[in-house]
């Protein structure tokens, strides 16, 4: 808040009212409903509901299928985050270094930010298609029979590649802006101290980028958990049957297909706790964030 | 004449292998980003039977007008009433409506939080702040039920307004307002400007670049929405392009006849063109907004 703020009584409330109303109706009400219905067992035909306490949670944690989805989500998140961060970092370091065409490379490497995940998913469906897919042809050339939507790990592979493709631009933009904010005198001093490019990167540039990297780590985990929904939904072509899926996708499948309101709500609450943990982690990091310049 | 090249070593035409290596990596990276879309473009210029027989195409064919024409103007879907044009218009309504709504709501809220001394300031801030804990994807089922009980399914209001229930824009403007020098508001008060006048005549003009940046980010976000439109709109007249992708996938999965590959690719390209164009043309604003908003 500003020191010299206005001391009006009604105006701030009036200014906040639209935002708070929308949040109350479309955020707090459904969030409250989710928590509430996670303690109830709904009749699938709509004939009332019964309070069951923590039974939905107990069922969830005892479920083998849920454990399998959770394991896949963990692996998926790890691979997408690590691959897209590493690729983007490499590209940002090179784009920061080259003298010619830096602007062109920057544009070429960031425009995919604007492509919607399901649109990328549709292109993935075509590229990895059993009949017409070019990637499938490439696999066949190496003697591997790639089958999207049939083989569990083949589908997982396509999901990871498409998710990484979409996520590289954001990471690239942040890494590049992080690199470009390293002052010239620091760079020159580093050049004198450590003429080897590789050593210089790990000893000087990378530690300077660490705050950006930590921040991006959280962003990427959140992305892999929640924003990949469109990619997964398109790649499994509406048919999750034997395909891998993430926790968020399962909330949707159980809630809308399986009509399991209580179970789906309990999953929502579990994810809520997960996001809460991530947010607290992020703030602890931000507090300790070191500024070198 | 002295040797000028020695003072500017960069201008020296010296062949360096490391530069070749750097450029190779950047070119490979750029190709990885470009190739899928290039393939979509080339494939969209071919006949479906040909694609079915020979796979995705690496060069242009002759059916580009036909596929794009069909994607845009042919009536498709179950009811045979919507064209690509309808979906394009709906996408613009969602993208622009969401971006403008977000900017207005969050500027007002951030102004109240930063520039006013009132009792509920902290409470209001935390109420808005808490929304980042629960993305729409997580509370999707209860959100859908709320919209249904208010009777907002299949309406633009039901499509746009629930998406506005988040904190992102408010944080962005709060951060920016906090960086505006304190002297400005002091000077305005000495000159007798009230809160409304200060907001409209000083703060809004000062925020122009920020508004543009957030508009781009929010437009792309709104345009690219998928799950929410999928649930809220069952009436095809309200489908957006990205929502239309789901119909294509469904038709593709049922797959009794040869899928309309070319047309599907054409629609995918149309669905990505406006947001991609905005991000490329207003690159510097977009990058500034992105890097500063998320910190």
Image (cartoon, coloured by chain):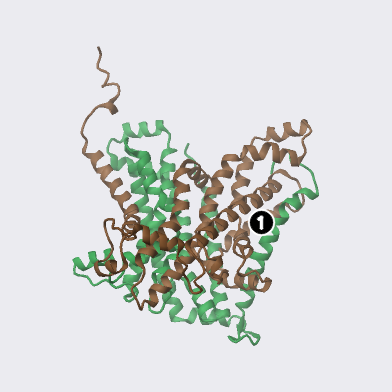
- Chain for disc number 1: B
Chain B tint as drawn: brown
Q: Which residue is mark 1?
A: B126
* Residue B186 vertical position relative to residue A68 in the rendered view, above or below: above
Q: In the image, residue A177 lies at what x, y percent?
A: 44, 42
The foreground one among B170 and B252 is B252
Element under label 1?
Answer: helix
Q: In the image, residue A291 lies at what x, y percent?
A: 49, 41
For residue B261, say whether it is visible: yes
* Residue A151 vertical position relative to residue A178 in the rendered view, above or below: below
Q: Residue at x 29, y 71 (%)?
A: A130
Residue A235 position by quadrant: bottom left
The foreground one among B177 and A280 is B177
**Looking at the figure, which quarter contains the N terminus of chain B?**
top left
Residue A54 position by quadrant: bottom right
Q: Residue at x 59, y 56 (%)?
A: B98
Q: In the image, residue A21 lies at what x, y percent?
A: 70, 60
Q: In the image, residue B8 lies at what x, y percent?
A: 30, 24
* Residue A72 vertical position relative to residue B192 in the rendered view, above or below: below
Count of numbered labels shown in the rendering: 1
Q: What residue occupies the far top of the structure in this picture? A: B1
Crowd around label 1: few <14 · some 14–19 · many ≥20 (10 Å): few
* Residue B138 vertical position relative to residue B165 in the rendered view, above or below: below
The foreground one among A199 and A92 is A92
The foreground one among A255 and A218 is A255
Q: Residue at x 32, y 38 (%)?
A: A98
For residue A132, say whether it is visible: no
Left or right placement of residue A276 versus residue B185 in this view: left
Q: Residue at x 37, y 50 (%)?
A: A88
Chain A tint as drawn: green
């Amino acid at each position: 808040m500003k020191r010299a703020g206005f001391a009006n009584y009604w105006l701030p409330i009036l200014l906040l009212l639209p935002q708070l109303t929308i949040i109350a109706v479309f955020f707090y009400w459904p969030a409250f409903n989710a928590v509430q219905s996670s303690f109830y067992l709904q009749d699938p035909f709509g004939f009332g509901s019964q309070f069951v306490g923590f039974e939905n949670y107990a069922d969830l944690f005892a479920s083998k299928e849920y454990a399998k989805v959770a394991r896949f989500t963990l692996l998926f998140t790890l691979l997408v985050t690590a691959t897209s961060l590493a690729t983007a970092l490499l590209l940002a370091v090179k784009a920061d270094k080259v003298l010619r065409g830096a602007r062109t490379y920057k544009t070429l490497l960031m425009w995919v930010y604007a492509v919607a995940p399901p649109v990328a998913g549709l292109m993935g469906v075509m590229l990895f298609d059993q009949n017409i897919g070019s990637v499938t042809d490439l696999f066949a050339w190496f003697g591997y029979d790639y089958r999207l939507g049939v083989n569990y790990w083949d589908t997982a592979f396509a999901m990871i590649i498409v998710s990484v493709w979409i996520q590289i631009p954001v990471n690239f933009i942040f890494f590049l802006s992080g690199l470009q904010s390293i002052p010239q005198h620091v760079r020159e001093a580093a050049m004198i101290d450590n003429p080897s490019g590789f050593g210089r990167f790990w000893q000087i540039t990378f530690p300077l980028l660490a705050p950006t990297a930590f921040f991006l780590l959280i962003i990427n985990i959140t992305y892999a958990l929640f924003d990949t929904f469109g990619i997964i939904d398109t790649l499994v072509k509406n048919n999750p049957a034997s395909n891998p899926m993430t926790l968020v996708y399962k909330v949707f499948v159980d809630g809308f297909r399986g009509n399991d309101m209580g179970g789906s709500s309990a999953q929502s609450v579990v994810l809520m706790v997960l996001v809460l943990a991530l947010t607290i982690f992020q703030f602890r990091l931000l507090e300790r964030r070191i500024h070198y310049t | 004449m002295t040797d000028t090249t020695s003072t500017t070593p960069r201008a020296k035409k010296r062949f360096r292998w490391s530069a070749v290596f750097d450029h190779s990596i950047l070119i490979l990276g750029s190709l990885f980003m470009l190739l899928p879309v290039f393939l979509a473009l080339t494939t969209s210029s071919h006949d479906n039977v040909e694609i079915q027989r020979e796979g995705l195409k690496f060069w242009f064919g002759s059916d580009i007008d036909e596929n794009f024409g069909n994607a845009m103007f042919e009536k498709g879907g179950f009811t045979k009433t919507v064209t690509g044009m309808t979906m394009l218009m709906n996408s613009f309504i969602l993208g622009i409506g969401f971006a403008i709504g977000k900017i207005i709501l969050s500027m007002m809220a951030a102004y109240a939080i930063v520039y006013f001394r009132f009792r509920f300031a902290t409470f209001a801030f935390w109420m808005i702040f808490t929304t980042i804990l629960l993305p729409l994807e997580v509370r999707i089922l209860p959100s859908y039920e709320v919209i249904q009980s208010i009777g907002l399914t299949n309406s633009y209001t039901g499509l746009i307004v629930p998406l506005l229930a988040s904190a992102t824009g408010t944080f962005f403007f709060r951060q920016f307002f906090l960086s505006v020098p304190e002297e400005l508001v002091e000077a305005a008060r000495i000159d007798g400007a009230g809160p409304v006048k200060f907001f409209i005549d000083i703060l809004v003009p000062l925020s122009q670049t920020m508004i543009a940046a957030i508009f781009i980010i929010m437009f792309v976000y709104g345009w690219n929405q998928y799950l929410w439109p999928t649930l809220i709109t069952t009436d095809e007249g309200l489908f957006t392009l990205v929502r239309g992708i789901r119909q294509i996938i469904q038709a593709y999965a049922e797959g009794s006849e040869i899928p309309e590959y070319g047309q599907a690719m054409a629609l995918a390209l149309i669905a990505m063109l406006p947001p991609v164009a905005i991000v490329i043309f207003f690159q510097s604003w977009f990058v500034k907004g992105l890097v500063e908003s998320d910190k």
